[in-house]
Amino acid sequence: MPAYKRILLKLSGEALMGDDAYGINRATIVRMVREIQEVTQLGCEVAVVIGGGNIFRGVAGGSVGMDRATADYMGMLATVMNALALADTMRQEGMTARVMSAISIDQVVEPYVRPKALQYLEEGKVVVFAGGTGNPFFTTDTAAALRGAEMGAQIMLKATKVDGVYTADPKKDPSATRYPTLTFDEAIIKNLQVLDATAFALCRDQKLPLKVFSIFKPGALKRVVMGGDEGTLVHV
Ligand code: UDP
């Protein structure tokens, strides 16, 4: 039995990039989708918020000096591309997925409608939330906290390159150790940047626990969902 019935998985755009400089790496996205499929087969309801960093990287040079809000809208559009790629790969792997966007691009994706999203989850479909929060000056981590709270997810899972929150940067300091658990207050006191301030405040206020783990470790998502000692749990 999975430890969580409904999860909100935040995937950064980088999770789809593999070793490429930017964009979507085919083998990587397939592997990512199979990891998600495994947890749906355990009976988990899965909502995904996807970032856009991998695509935005390709145009980052051109955005230098650009108005922040405009660049942010470009970033939101990048998340829509990732969401489409993710849902299409899910379809190819035999899963049923729906993309819902916070910015309306009606010909391409359906708009985010909360009751409909809840219905999809209840039907066992994977819902991929695109377009972040639909507002500039926010991040997809904040979108993940927001949608996680709206969907009544039991936990937000933040997939990163590192397998948890460490006492120091493990790449620079080999003696750094991983925190198995932390409270939100401890994370503030220790000045650990687990999420941006807006996302962090939302999770803490809504009592939405957060698990930080590495999606690059094969089987890690399943271990997290089964309640295994994987990554770092940040809780109230
Ligand atoms: N973005 C935004 N509002 C949101 C979510 C995202 O403006 O609610 C923009 C912002 O420019 C951000 C980009 O979309 O940099 C991609 O999101 P993010 O950087 O969070 O993606 P990730 O780094 O996780 O791939």
Image (cartoon, rainbow, N blue to C red):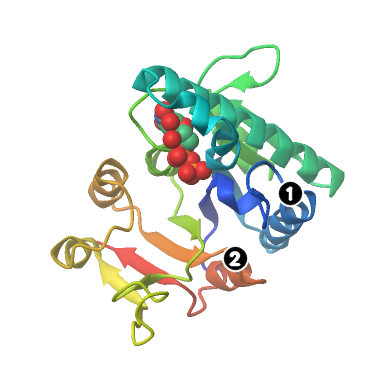
Residue at horizontal 23%, vertical 61%? 184
Query: Residue 154's image quarter?
Result: bottom left
Name the residue: 42% across, 63% down.
211
Residue carrying label 2:
221
Horizontal side of residue 135 vs 217, given as left or right: left
Left or right: where does residue 34 sit relative to residue 208? Answer: right
Residue 90 locus on image (x, y percent):
77, 45
Would the CB of label 1 be found within 8 Å of ligand 1?
Answer: no
Identify the residue shown where x is 42% and y is 17%: 70
Relative to 41, say whether 106 is above or below. above
In the rendered image, residue 189, in percent from the top left (x then y), is placed at 13, 65
Instruction: Report whether 94 appears left or right of 83.
Output: right
Instruction: Estimate the x, y position of residue 119 in percent, counting from the top left.
Output: 60, 34
Contact between marks 2 and 1 (CB within 8 A): the answer is no
- Which tag, 2 or 1, sits closer to the chain's start? 1
- Element assignment for label 1: loop
Q: Examine the rendered structure and indicate whether residue 192 appears above or below residue 67.
A: below
Drawn side of residue 113 relative to residue 19, left or right: left
Q: What whole-number distance in Å separates the C-alpha atoms at marks 2 and 1?
A: 19 Å
User: Residue extending furthest left?
Assistant: 189
Q: Which residue is mark 1?
A: 25
Asked if the residue at label 2 sits under 8 Å from ligand 1, the reply is no
Q: Quadrant of the N terminus?
A: bottom right
Q: Depth check: give the residue in front, 225 or 43.
A: 225
Work out which residue is located at the far bottom of the displayed protein and give it: 175
Mark number displayed over residue 92: none
Query: Identity of the amino acid at label 2?
Result: Leu
